[in-house]
Amino acid sequence: MSSLSRLNPKTGIVDFWTEFRKPNPFRVPMLLASTVPLMVIFYWLSGETHYSAPERPTITYITTFDPERTDEEIIASNEANQEIKDLRKAAQDDVAERKREIYKALGKGIGMDVDKIAAEADARRAAEEAAAAEQRAQRYGRASADSSETGEPPAESTRP
């Protein structure tokens, strides 16, 4: 048997027409119902979405300082800001110190050696600050404080 005879659409069309010509009251509604999925698929495939080019943004510059300021005004502003920054840092340090005192009192109350723990914490804090200072010095290509005191040549910069 040839594979072309199995794929011949003529026999399928003849069979459809034979069944469709029979007097069946449901033939037209069934034909319409069977075309609905195809129509939905074709409608879905025919829809296209067109996106327009986005509108170019408008940039609004916010100036908080007068562009005509003098150098003296700029210096005065910087000094005022530095004073506020120093006050905030002092307040943070004060809060941290009060926390340490509270924890020391709590530690003494439960029988811990708070002097030893405080010494270890101070040593660890100093080591972290020294490491941060060294890292900043290396980042900005400066010699560390230790190498300048010992007379060693400055470390090479790691910046590309």
Image (cartoon, helix red, strand yellow):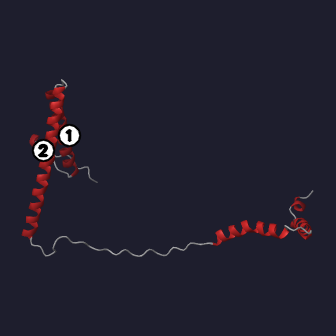
Which percent across, then down, holds residue 93? 14, 45
Q: Is residue 101 visible from the viewing direction of this image?
A: yes
Q: Residue at x 14, y 50 (%)?
A: 89
What is the three-letter code of the residue carrying label 2?
A: Asp
Q: Residue at x 11, y 62 (%)?
A: 78
* Real-space Cα separation, disc 1 to disc 2, in angstroms: 20 Å
Which percent across, then down, holds residue 130? 17, 41
Rendered image quadrant of residue 73: bottom left
Apparent side of residue 159 relative to residue 15 in the rendered image (left or right): left
Apparent side of residue 3 relative to residue 60 in the rendered image (left or right): right
Marks 1 and 2, the one that precedes in the sequence: 2
Q: Residues within 10 Å of mark 1 (few under 14, many from 20)?
A: few
Instruction: State the residue position of label 2.
Output: 94
Apparent side of residue 149 relative to residue 61 in the rendered image (left or right): left
Apparent side of residue 29 relative to residue 85 in the rendered image (left or right): right
Residue 128: mark? 1
Mark 1 or 2: the one toward you: 2
- Name above or below for residue 86 compared with residue 67: above
Asked if marks 1 and 2 touch (Cβ < 8 Å), the reply is no
Q: Residue at x 18, y 48 (%)?
A: 137
